[in-house]
Amino acid sequence: MQNYSTYLSSQDSPLQRIDHLLAESLPISLYLKRDDLLHPLVSGNKWRKLKYNLIAAQEQGFQTLLTFGGARSNHLYATAAAGQLLGLKTIGVVRGDEPALLNSPTIQFCQAAGMTIHQVSRAAFREKESPDFLANLAQLFGPAYILPEGGTNDLAIRGTSEIMPELMDQLGAAPDVVCCAVGTGGTVLGLATSAPPQTDVMGFMALKGWSPPLDPAHPNLTYQKDYHFGGYAKTTPELLRFVADFEAQTGILIEQVYTAKMLFGVLDLASKGHFKPKATVVAVHTGGLQGRDDILFRKLSSL
């Protein structure tokens, strides 16, 4: 069995200045932390979240990983890929029991990587953390290391907390602001945990109608709720035009669920004077490029 801690290196995530690549002049110095380059399959913040969980799974002698997600889940995709790399069995409990969900490119990849897919109804999926639900899974699949939906737990936050000191070393100073997209919140909490007092951490919500409560332990952490574009995985022509323009100008691929919405928000806030003049702002590219599917490309080509 391969050792996960030696398989990948965070040195593969450079810090890239991008404000000079964009057509419009920005009142800030904007950098992109390229976690999308960490690994072609175990991508971005999923690599960070899995790091210490997989080390723990191996240390505890588990041969199987079991986790949860939807039919287009970046987390399922990354877990399947990591399991294949390490020679671990993987089980994916998928939200929704419609047979058509098995046609998702994400699920097809997971199955090709050796993941066993276990579909459950949406009602049953909501009980995924209950003792009875987990006991039933244990009867079906035997002992397994349980990873939560989205991968966020204390070990995941330990992994994402390493982004901040890493980018500070690359930058040679503490940035004024670090921004990232927010789904389950593991990445933004990791950033806030290791942020110095002079750095603000800003999370851009990818979900509509929900944001975590403010945490007194992280006074520098705030959330932006106005850039979800209709909700999780929703898009608009404006967002898709932004994706096309950003990629054409920078040559950097982004996806529409998380990173594009965060970058749109950062640039919009900068244009409105939200950041202090000449502020150093770092945006974290959290990967997930497997979410760039054919539907997106067709929408882009029709704009």
Image (spheres, rainbow, N blue to C red):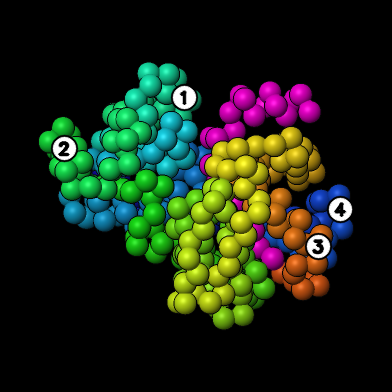
The segment highlighted magenta reads: 281-303
SS of the residue at dot 3?
A: loop
Residue at label 1? 104
Q: Is residue 292 magenta?
A: yes
Mark pair 2, 4: CA separation: 55 Å
Q: Is residue 261 left or right of residue 96?
A: right
Q: Is residue 81 above or below residue 301?
A: below
Instruction: Please tell me how crowded label 1 is: few (under 14), some (14-19), or many (20+) other residues with Cα within 10 Å.
Output: some
Residue at (77% x, 73% y) in the render: 276
Q: Which sits earlier in the primary sequence, circle 3 or circle 4?
A: 4
Residue at label 4? 24
Residue at label 2? 136
Q: Which sits earlier in the primary sequence, circle 3 or circle 2?
A: 2
Looking at the picture, tell me which residue is in the foreground, 287 or 168.
287
Callout 1, which amino acid? Answer: Ser
Q: Which sits earlier in the primary sequence, circle 1 or circle 2?
A: 1
Mark pair 1, 2: CA separation: 26 Å
Residue at (20% x, 41% y) in the render: 133
Look at discs 1 and 2 and give the one toward the viewer.
Answer: 2
Q: Position of residue 93 (x, y in %)?
A: 31, 35
Q: Is residue 5 above or below residue 1?
A: below
Residue at (32% x, 41% y) in the render: 126
